[in-house]
Image (spheres, rainbow, N blue to C red):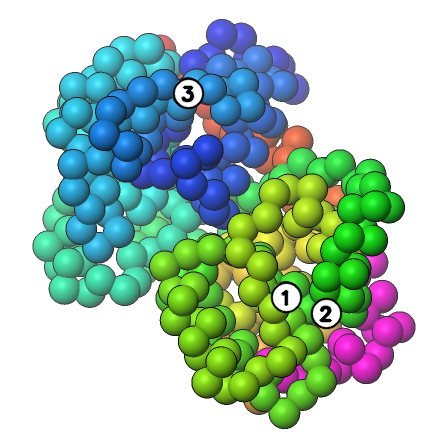
């Protein structure tokens, strides 16, 4: 593959490291990291809840943060960002939006961007149906104007009514991640083993409404299976209250942990449980991380990329959404059959090696950037 030279990419999304940690932020980080190897320079344009706008460096990437003015239905808006966006676009060769963020759509139209543009389409807008009616005209105008749209899996492309309208400019690039450092000290493993034991199921993610964690808590009744929940988020207190009401002794909430601790917990776990029950969960980076470490996966069939990452009966089990009984049975099947768990974990690692490495994703995005630049020159 020909190396891209002096390509400057501006990533646009409402939140980013180090202020927030989530699956979508991790995807942007992985794209920045893995396209850098192809000669691409990246910046991230985002908002901050701090009073002052600033620029911070995160893992070699400059993050331009603009003070958020207001937030409506999880969508941040910023007056300061309007001027800042125009200046950031001047620096960039290509503007790379991450959808959904309605204010990002608005920024694109207000700035009258005339440079090559693409959107990574992470998820349909699911929850805010009454706001969606107001947003729909802006969304359609924005998606009609960008040059390319990336779907993260064939599954999501095939089942998204929105993407079907723009199929001529959609291509699929699965999300990939770097093979993380596996050398975790024995002391670190012993520390977590003493705290949480072994042979538990692990959930990692931001604690949001669509993650299906209330269903997981229901599933933990009347079973000896244990679950460790890693992450923080807007429904954390509600989930803990629910666990107390159900009198569950087989679930542990750890809150946010750093990457080394997350790897240690993954190594100690029996498998990954990912009970998201709505299409807001478009992919599931945690499933890829579990596959990387050779763990069997449990997820639900919601017509999204989760069932592309986790192949039922091969890399793990795929169950109906919002079904505590099926979730409980899936955990018990894996917990009671160590040979099956190992076979599924080995298959998951092989699928990661074949499809979900960060380097493959980086090469595909770099090629797309290069093609968009060529098309722009040819116009």
Tell me the SS state at disc 2.
loop
Q: Is residue 99 above or below residue 63?
A: below
Q: Residues within 10 Å of mark 1 (few under 14, many from 20)?
A: many
Residue in the image at 77% along x and 66% along y: 197
Closer to the camera in the image, 90 or 118? 90
Is residue 212 visible in the rendered image? The answer is no
Q: Are marks 2 and 1 in contact (CB under 8 Å)?
A: yes
Q: Is residue 305 above or below residue 63?
A: below
Measuring from the top left, give residue 332's x and y in whole percent. 72, 83
Q: Residue furthest right?
A: 339
Q: Is residue 87 left or right of residue 3?
A: left
Closer to the camera in the image, 327 or 116? 327
Q: Residues within 10 Å of mark 3 (few under 14, many from 20)?
A: some
- For marks 2 and 3, the one nearer the N-term is 3
Query: Which residue carries the number 1 mark?
Result: 228
Q: Main secondary structure of the magenta part?
A: helix
Question: Mark 2 and mark 3: span between their CA atoms?
Answer: 38 Å
Please state, as top left, top right, bottom left or bottom right, where the N terminus lies in the image: top right
Closer to the camera in the image, 377 or 283? 283
Measuring from the top left, give residue 375's x and y in whole percent. 38, 19
Residue in the image at 80% along x and 42% along y: 184
Residue 219 occupies quadrant: bottom right
Q: Is residue 332 above or below residue 285?
A: below
Q: Is residue 255 left or right of residue 99?
A: right
Is residue 26 visible in the rendered image? The answer is yes
Query: Which residue carries the number 3 mark?
Result: 56
Magenta span:
327-347
Query: Which residue carries the number 2 mark?
Result: 200
Residue 328 belongs to the span the image colors magenta: yes
- For marks 1 and 3, the one nearer the N-term is 3
Please state, as top left, top right, bottom left or bottom right, where the C terminus lies in the image: top left
């Amino acid at each position: 593959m020909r190396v891209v030279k002096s390509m400057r990419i501006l990533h646009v999304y409402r939140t980013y490291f180090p202020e927030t940690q989530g699956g979508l932020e991790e995807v942007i980080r992985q794209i920045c990291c893995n396209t850098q190897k192809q000669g691409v320079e990246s910046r991230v344009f985002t908002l901050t809840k701090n009073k002052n706008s600033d620029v911070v460096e995160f893992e070699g990437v400059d993050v331009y943060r603009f003070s958020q003015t207001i937030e409506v239905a999880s969508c941040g808006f910023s007056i300061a960002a309007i001027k800042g966006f125009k200046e950031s676009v001047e620096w960039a060769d290509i503007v790379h939006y991450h959808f959904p963020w309605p204010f990002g759509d608005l920024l694109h139209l207000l700035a009258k961007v005339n440079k090559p543009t693409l959107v990574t389409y992470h998820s349909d807008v699911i929850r805010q149906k009454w706001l969606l009616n107001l947003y729909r005209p802006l969304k359609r105008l924005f998606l009609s104007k960008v040059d390319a749209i990336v779907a993260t899996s064939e599954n999501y492309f095939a089942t998204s009514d929105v993407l079907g309208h723009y199929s001529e400019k959609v291509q699929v690039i699965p999300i990939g991640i770097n093979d993380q450092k596996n050398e975790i000290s024995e002391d670190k493993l012993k520390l977590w083993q003493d705290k949480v034991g072994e042979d538990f199921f692990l959930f990692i993610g931001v604690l949001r409404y669509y993650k299906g964690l209330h269903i997981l808590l229901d599933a933990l009744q009347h079973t000896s299976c244990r679950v460790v929940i890693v992450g923080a988020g807007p429904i954390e207190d509600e989930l803990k209250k629910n666990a107390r009401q159900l009198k569950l002794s087989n679930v542990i909430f750890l809150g946010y942990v750093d990457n080394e601790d997350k790897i240690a917990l993954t190594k100690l776990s029996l498998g990954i449980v990912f009970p998201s029950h709505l299409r807001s969960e478009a992919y599931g980076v945690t499933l890829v991380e579990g596959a990387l470490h050779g763990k069997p996966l449990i997820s639900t069939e919601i017509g999204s990329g989760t069932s592309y990452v986790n192949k039922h009966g091969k890399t793990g089990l795929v169950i109906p959404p919002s079904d505590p009984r099926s979730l409980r049975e899936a955990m018990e099947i894996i917990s009671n059959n160590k040979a099956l768990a190992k076979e599924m974990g080995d298959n998951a690692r092989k699928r990661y090696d074949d499809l979900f490495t960060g380097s493959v994703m980086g090469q595909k995005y770099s090629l797309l950037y290069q093609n968009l630049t060529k098309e722009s020159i040819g116009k």
